[in-house]
Image (cartoon, rainbow, N blue to C red):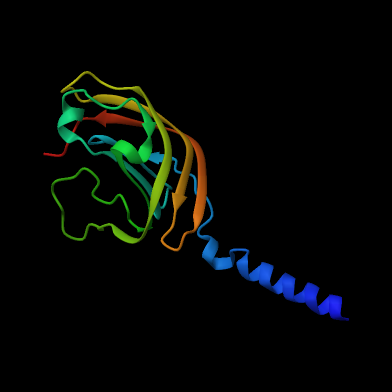
């Protein structure tokens, strides 16, 4: 009987630590890419989960000086966001009445490695492609979501609204 109580206590403790609702959202297919700017942006179809990788050195990116490989967090602002209409009015400088606006509920930090395999010439708007490796998102309560390997394209790298 004593062994059963100890075993039951261990099972309760393990189930409490197993994640449950605190484990975070399930992985989502980031299949919709959003062009514009100096970065790589994608979401699911419903725009409820979005990945935003923005190159920090705007002047360097404009001059064609982009770190081609390394840790994402070294040169990029990288987030996984959860909310609604996350890419509403994306790269749009005119907000029309009754258009949705992005609402971010939660932001997770992204780490991993990036390899920029394609960039347009300096000062030219064009296609950029990055391969992301060992991508992990960390939630505000230390939740972890492994996104793994991703390839993402921005067909309008260096283009901006206006």
Q: Residue at x 22, y 57 (%)?
A: 99
Q: Using the rendered view, name the quadrant where residue 84 is placed.
A: bottom left
Q: Residue furthest bottom?
A: 1
Q: Residue at x 35, y 41 (%)?
A: 73
Residue 90 falls left or right of residue 26: left
Residue 95, how many percent across, how many down?
Answer: 15, 53
Q: Quadrant of the N terminus?
A: bottom right
Q: Quadrant of the C terminus?
A: top left
Q: Residue furthest top?
A: 121
Counting every numbered tag in the picture gives: 0
Residue 59, how many percent across, how many down?
Answer: 14, 31
Q: Nearer the viewer, residue 99 or 150?
A: 150
Residue 21 falls left or right of residue 81: right
Residue 94, how many percent across, how many down?
Answer: 13, 49
Q: Residue at x 17, y 36 (%)?
A: 160
Q: Nearer the viewer, residue 33 or 55?
A: 55
Q: Residue furthest left?
A: 162
Q: Using the rendered view, name the quadrant where residue 37 is placed.
A: top left
- Residue 40 in sight from this viewpoint: no
- Residue 109 in sight from this viewpoint: yes
Q: Residue at x 24, y 34 (%)?
A: 38
Q: Using the rendered view, name the quadrant where residue 132 is placed.
A: top left
Q: Nearer the viewer, residue 45 or 3?
A: 3
Up the image or down, 91 lies above or below 47; here it is: above
Residue 88 falls left or right of residue 131: left
Residue 71, how many percent across, how many down?
Answer: 39, 35
Q: Residue furthest right?
A: 1
């Amino acid at each position: 009987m004593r062994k059963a109580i100890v075993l039951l206590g261990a099972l309760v403790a393990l189930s409490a630590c197993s994640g449950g609702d605190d484990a975070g959202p399930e992985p989502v297919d980031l299949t919709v890419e959003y062009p514009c700017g100096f970065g790589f942006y994608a979401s699911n179809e419903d725009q409820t989960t979005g990945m935003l990788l923005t190159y920090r050195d705007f002047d360097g990116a404009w001059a064609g000086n982009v770190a081609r490989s390394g840790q994402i967090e070294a040169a990029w602002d990288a987030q996984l966001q959860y909310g609604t209409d996350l890419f509403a009015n994306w790269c749009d400088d005119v907000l029309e009445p009754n258009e949705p606006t992005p609402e971010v509920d939660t932001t997770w930090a992204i780490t991993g490695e990036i390899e920029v395999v394609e960039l347009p010439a300096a000062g030219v708007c064009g296609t950029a492609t990055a391969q992301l490796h060992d991508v992990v998102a960390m939630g505000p309560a230390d939740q972890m979501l492994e996104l793994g390997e991703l390839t993402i394209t921005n067909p309008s790298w260096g283009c901006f609204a206006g």
